[in-house]
Image (cartoon, grey):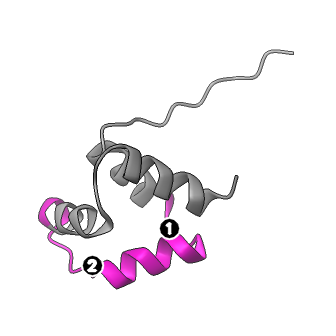
Amino acid sequence: MRLKDEIKGYIASSGWTITQITEELNKRNGTNYTMQNLSSKIRKESLKYHEILEIADIIGYEIVWNRKTN
C-alpha cells in the first residue's frame, strides 16, 4: 500500500477530512496551510516526518517503531 493511500485511509476512518486536518494544523502551529497544499503533499508523498506525526496525533493515532523479530 502506498503512503498516500494509507494516510488518506487513516484520516477517513477516523472521521476527519483534509479540510479539518488543515484547520487543526494551522491552529496548533500558527501556519497557513491550505487544503490544496496539504492534499498535494499527501498525493505527492512529500510530507515531512514531523507533519505525518502531527496528522497522526490530530486523528488520534501514534506512530510506533517496533524492532522486527527474526
Indicate the secondary structure of the residue bearing disc 2: loop
Residue at the image point whose x is 21% and y is 80% from the top: 32
What amino acid is found at the position of numbered circle 1 in the picture?
Leu
30 horizontally vs 53: left or right? left
Q: In which quarter of the image is the C terminus?
A: top right
Q: Is residue 34 on the magenta stretch? A: yes
**Horizontal and vertical percent position of residue 11:** 39, 52
Label 1, residues with CA under 10 Å away: few <14, some 14-19, many ≥20: some
Decide: marks 2, 1 in contact (CB < 8 A)?
Answer: no
2 horizontally vs 27: left or right? right
Extent of the magenta region:
27-49
Residue at the image point whose x is 40% and y is 60% from the top: 51
Q: Closer to the camera, 22 or 66?
A: 22
Residue at the image point whose x is 25% and y is 70% from the top: 19
Indicate the secondary structure of the residue bearing disc 1: loop
Label 2 sits on residue = 33
Q: In this view, does 38 lie above or below 9?
A: below
What amino acid is found at the position of numbered circle 2 in the picture?
Tyr
**Horizontal and vertical percent position of residue 8:** 47, 58
36 horizontally vs 45: left or right? left
